[in-house]
Amino acid sequence: SEEGIAHRKRRCWDVEAVFGNIKQNMGFKRFMLRGMDKITTEMGLIAMAHNLKKFSIA
């Protein structure tokens, strides 16, 4: 549908902006830990920090 196509186009930009913000503004370049479980935990902490920062501004 037309609405679905518009949503998919917008979603691509939304996700890219989040990762760009994390990398550029928060200075995240590489994972410090190794292993999928540890990386999942580290990425979760980074995402929480991003969300808290976003909510504190609003």
Image: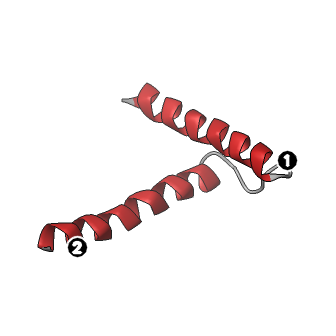
Which x, y percent locates residue 11? 35, 62
Which one is nearer the viewer's eye here, 51 or 41?
A: 41
- At x 55% / y 56%, what residue is drawn? 19
Task: Classify 10 Å Cα crowding around label 2: few (below 14), some (14-19), many (20 and above).
Answer: few
Q: Quadrant of the N terminus?
A: bottom left
Secondary element type, mark 1? loop
Q: Which residue is mark 2?
A: 5
Instruction: Say which residue appears at 48% left-offset and 62% top-offset.
Output: 16
| Mark 2 or 1, nearer chain start | 2
Q: In the drawing, what numbered circle is on residue 33?
A: 1
Q: Quadrant of the C terminus?
A: top left
Residue 32 falls left or right of residue 6: right
Residue type at the position of mark 2:
Ile
Q: Is residue 32 left or right of residue 14?
A: right
Three-letter code for the amino acid on which mark 1 is drawn: Leu
Neighbourhood count class around disc 1 (C-alpha, 10 Å): few under 14, some 14–19, many 20 upward: few
Badge 2 element = helix
Q: CA distance from mark 2 to mark 1?
A: 38 Å
Q: Residue at x 83, y 52 (%)?
A: 35
- Above or below residue 23? Residue 5 is below
Q: Using the image as rendered, state which of residue 14 and residue 43 is in the foreground.
A: 43
Tell me: 34 left or right of 30.
right
Question: Is there CB contact under 8 Å for labels 2 and 1?
Answer: no
- The number of numbered badges drawn on the structure is 2
